[in-house]
Each structure stands twice: as structure tokens, then as C-alpha cells.
Image: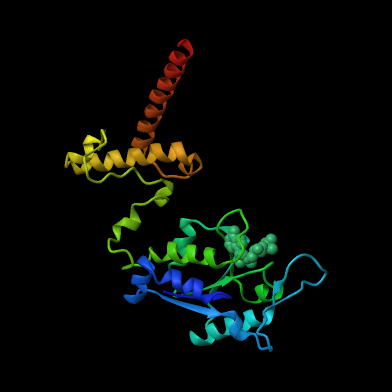
Amino acid sequence: MNFHILTLFPEMVQNTLKTSITGRAVNAGHLSINAVNIRDYAFNKHQSVDDYPYGGGAGMLMQAEPVYLAYEAVKEKIGGRRPRTVYLSPQGNVFNQKMAEEFSEEEDLILLCGHYEGIDERVLEEIVTDYVSIGDYVLTGGELPAMVMVDAISRLIPGVLHNDVSAEFESFQDNLLEYPQYSRPEDWRGKKVPPVLLSGHHANIERWRREQSIIRTYERRPDLLKKSCLTEKERLWFSQWLSENNEKTRSDSKSENED
Ligand code: SAM
């Protein structure tokens, strides 16, 4: 997969993405990062890319033409096709795992990073296919959001993670969070690894992990649990777990009140 990142700060994107797993994936040829400097397409004496917004207001706006020419350069490079083009914006749909999966099917993806107060609306209307936010807060630029997207999408591309199953059994698959995990030593400062994980009984381990995922999602992200697909057996088990735990909470708070 080829990521084309249109930005005023190409070195920020390149330096970060050449490290760790994304860097190895680039070296192995699983993906490419093409950071395009929008300023290279500003054909004025000072290579300026921003100007005051019409109608007044605080801050500067990125102008349409340099962004458009940078986009056209990518389009030409990939044989004239119009690739899916994401504008990173706090006004977009909030990025999630499902979107990462969908984007990972693309051969080429353009990520457009804004700065200052954003970008002239007319070029956005012309080239953008998707508006994506990484959360309900405002950052100074689109570079960090673009890198968040590249990271999340890359690890879904076959070959990028050494162990392909590790992307399959992670948080958000099936709208469940991942179960707790433990490594050596078996006893860390008196805290022991759950015995089932040492049993070697694969079916029991699988069942325990699935149950822990359900409990963890219930406790931390009940909104997700509502969207998950539990089997009939799991539903029965979970309602029993809930009634046992509600009873336990009631008796715990009763004894606390009595103390
Ligand atoms: N004036 C814009 C608004 O209110 O929608 C915000 C501009 S922001 C200061 C500058 C740039 O940062 C944006 O053009 C966008 O590319 C990026 N950005 C800021 N917050 C973001 C977020 N939550 N998700 C994705 N991109 C964001």
C-alpha cells in the first residue's frame, strides 16, 4: 500500500514513520510513505502557502492552489487515477478500527494535513473523498492524525506484523476489548498468573480469554459490548456472571455500611 502525505512538514512525517514497525515494513516493501511538501508547489517568491481568510477572523488559511498542485502531482505519479483522499480534520468522522480495515484495502491513499486555521474550502470540495478526525479536540496540524492513521492501517496489511494472528485477536475485533495478558515471571511481587493460562488446556484458555474480553468490555466500554456478537451460550454465561457480581457488589456495600 502507498501512503501519500500532503504536508507542510514532510520531515516530521518521514522521521517518525521510518522508525519501528512502519519503518521495517517500508524497508521490506510492504508499504511506501511518500511525503509531499505542499510548499514545493507554491509558485511565489517567498514560497508562502497561506493567506488571510475573506470576511476576516483570526489566523491564516492554507491556499487552494498549492494543495491542488501537490494533489495533481501525486495523481500523475500513480498513472492519473483519483485515489481516495482523506482530509484530516476535527470536523470529520472519528477514526476507528473498522475504518482502518476499510482503508487498508486501498492501493494508494492520500492524507491531506491542514495547518493554521485549515484549508480553503474550494480545493477540499475538489479533491477530498473522506473527512477523518482522530478525536473531539483541536490539534495544530494534521500530521499527527495522519501518522495515527498510517500506523493503525499499516499493521493490518499482510506481512507488516510478524505474526498475522496478533492483529486478528486484538481489541475492537468483534467489538470486544482484548483479554488481560501475562508474561514471565509466574509470580510477580506476590501477584500470580491466572492458573488456567499455565494449564496447557487450549480450549479452557480460549474460553477464559473470551470471557475476560466480555467482562473487560462491559467494565471499560459498555457502549461497545452492545454492538458485539455473543453466542447464545456466552449470553447465558454473561447474565449469570452479572447477577453473581451484582449480588457480590450489594453484599460488599452492605458490609461496608455496617462497618
Ligand atoms: N479551524 C479548524 C476547525 O475549527 O475545524 C481547525 C484547524 S486546526 C487548528 C489545523 C489543522 O489541524 C486542521 O486543518 C486539521 O488538518 C488538523 N487537525 C486538528 N485537529 C484535528 C483532529 N482532531 N483530527 C484530525 N485533524 C485535526
Query: Quarter of the image holding residue 68?
Result: bottom right
Residue at image location 39% in from the left, 39% down from the top: 214
Identify whether 152 is placed above or below 33: above
Left or right, 68 with respect to 222, comes to right
The x, y position of residue 52, in whole percent, is: 76, 73
Left or right, 81 with respect to 169, comes to right
Quadrant in which the C terminus appears: top left
Q: Which of the two residues, 50 or 133, is positioned nearer the viewer here? A: 50
Residue at image location 39% in from the left, 36% down from the top: 215
Residue found farthest to the right: 55
Quadrant in which the N terminus appears: bottom left
Identify whether 89 is placed above or below 176: below
The x, y position of residue 139, in whole percent, is: 60, 60
Residue at image location 77% in from the left, 71% down from the top: 53
Residue at image location 39% in from the left, 35% down from the top: 235
Left or right, 166 with respect to 252, comes to left
Q: Is residue 106 visible?
A: no
The x, y position of residue 157, in whole percent, is: 37, 67
